[in-house]
Image (cartoon, helix red, strand yellow):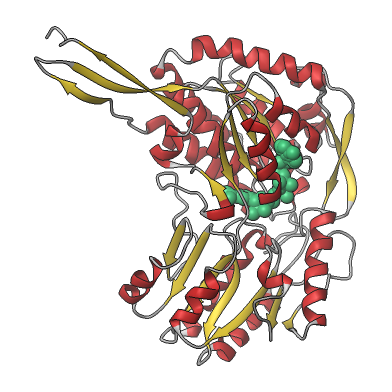
Amino acid sequence: MSSAIADIVSADALDFAADGAFDVINPATGEVFAQAPQIGDKALDLVFATAQDAFQSWRRDEGVRRAALRAAADAVEKRAGELVPVLTAEQGKPLNDALEEIGAAAAWLRYYAELEVPREVIQDDAVAYQEVVRKPLGVVAAITPWNFPLALASWKIAPALRAGNTVVLKPSPFTPLATLALGQVLREVLPDGVLSVVTGRDPLGAAMVAHPVPRKVSFTGSTATGKKVAASAADDLKRVTLELGGNDPAIILPDVDVAAIAQDLFWSAYRNNGQVCLAVKRVYAHESIHAELVDALATIAATIKVDDGVVAGAQLGPINNRPQFARVSELVTDALGRGARAVTGGAPLDRPGYFYAPTILDHVDDGIRIVDEEQFGPVLPVMSYRDEADALARANRTNYGLTASIWSGDAERALALATEVDSGQVTINSHGAGVRPNLPFGGHKWSGLGVENGPWGLYGFTELQVLAGPPRRK
Ligand code: NAD
């Protein structure tokens, strides 16, 4: 274990006594390279009690909170160089991508520091005074996945703290270290108890949701786990925001310039090795351009440098963890067994670690697992369709509804079709352009409940209260 990581997980750096430790694997080698603290029930009680105490003063002064979030953004930017190698070592993404993710975390903290939240005075005249105020909920349990541990943590920490809540944050057991390091960086600029990071295997997440202290659970992860979170939180009516899986379609109209869109479309599917909730996961290309598009995507895929994220020039790293690597392999094998053709890729790379060749699948259709399920990896099935009604029906036929995109030479035409797609975002001639601190992000159907980002995301960490009374003295 490097000395930097030993510092991150040392007893001095933690707010609580750990109940043992669990292994952390570098996906580029498949080897254990560190251990992270496993938090038990008693420590969790203590952390929640501390967060509850801290809430009593943190909720009172918005100016203090905004200044602290500004300082938090500065600190993350200043210490990005320390966070980058930790994130790459446990997550697998290339160093540049890790730096970009940390930049996003800082940007989200800064956005919420600067966001103006106007007072909502409904009536203030000679007859009456009425105001709607947004009160923080209390302690928030924040639970994150392994694909963007720091960026997705900031989507929760920034609005929750800005609204006046305190936060207990749990990263995925596959990527605990960068989040622990982020916690250390942020605690230097935040009052005690306002943010705690706890690490442990999956049951720790369940224990947080079932715990009596938190009043809100903000969860990002799979749909299967999200349903369990919703059921458990219902017991004491905790508020929940769920950001869940997606099976995001890209519809390619016949009038596109294939050569002009191929790079953007490729990276919309393969960024972070396809381990992005809103990655393009199914392509529906009009039959007149389908073959040309398959060729263009396969040509790009074949040139991608896949390597350990620390190697200069690596464009994609390994898949993050063994179960996900096994799942991607299984879905491709299943598709190939059902008549799909891997135009490029189609198998793991012959080396240690969880490396998989970027794969473009042709001769695929709805009804096979790689199309119907969320693959969350470097594999893209490219289907063909006959007319727009067919493409829309197929785009909408899954239980997911996170994001979608429509690609066309006629942006107005594409925009008109976009309203027919049932998902939280539909972008034209790009995919995911709607992921901004100031735009709501959330899924329809099984892709989620509630939204993150923008003022809407902040409102999700509040409860409304009406203050009504006689006219105020002017
Ligand atoms: P996961 O559901 O397995 O785990 C997510 C988190 O939940 C982890 O921290 C895990 O330890 C914790 N957890 C596990 N069981 C729990 C339980 N019973 N109660 C509470 N917490 C529990 O998901 P993952 O494999 O880490 O992440 C990949 C999934 O996340 C994909 O489906 C992806 O689409 C989704 N995702 C969604 C978004 C979004 O914004 N919609 C963003 C990123 C990832």
Which quadrant is the C terminus positioned in? Answer: top left
Identify which residue is drawn at 51% across, 54% down: 444
Q: Position of residue 358 (x, y in %)?
A: 72, 72
In-front residue for pair 72/282: 282
- The relative height of residue 153 versus residue 252 in the rendered view (above or below) is above
One can see residue 59 in this view: yes
User: With 254 as the anchor, is 174 left or right in this view?
Assistant: right
Left or right: 142 in relation to 22: left
Q: Residue 354 is drawn in which quadrant?
A: bottom right
Which residue is at a point 62% across and 80% down the rendered structure image?
382
Image position, residue 413 (x, y; %) = 33, 76
- For the view shown, which residue lies furthest in the top direction? 473
Q: Quadrant of residue 370?
A: bottom right
- Can I make out residue 356 in this image? no
Task: Tell me if residue 370 comes above or below residue 45 in the rendering.
Answer: below
The image quadrant where one finds the N terminus is: top right
Residue extending furthest front? 235
Q: Is residue 308 left or right of residue 439?
A: right
Residue furthest left in the image: 126
In this rendering, is residue 424 above or below 7?
Answer: below
- Quarter assignment of residue 426: bottom left
Where residue 409 sits: x, y (%)?
A: 37, 80
Task: Give percent across and percent down for residue 127.
Answer: 11, 15
Tag count in the figure? 0
Q: Indicate which quadrant contains ligand 1.
A: top right
- Give the left or right position of residue 424, taking residue 10 as reference: left
The residue lying at 58 percent from left, 19 percent from top is 194
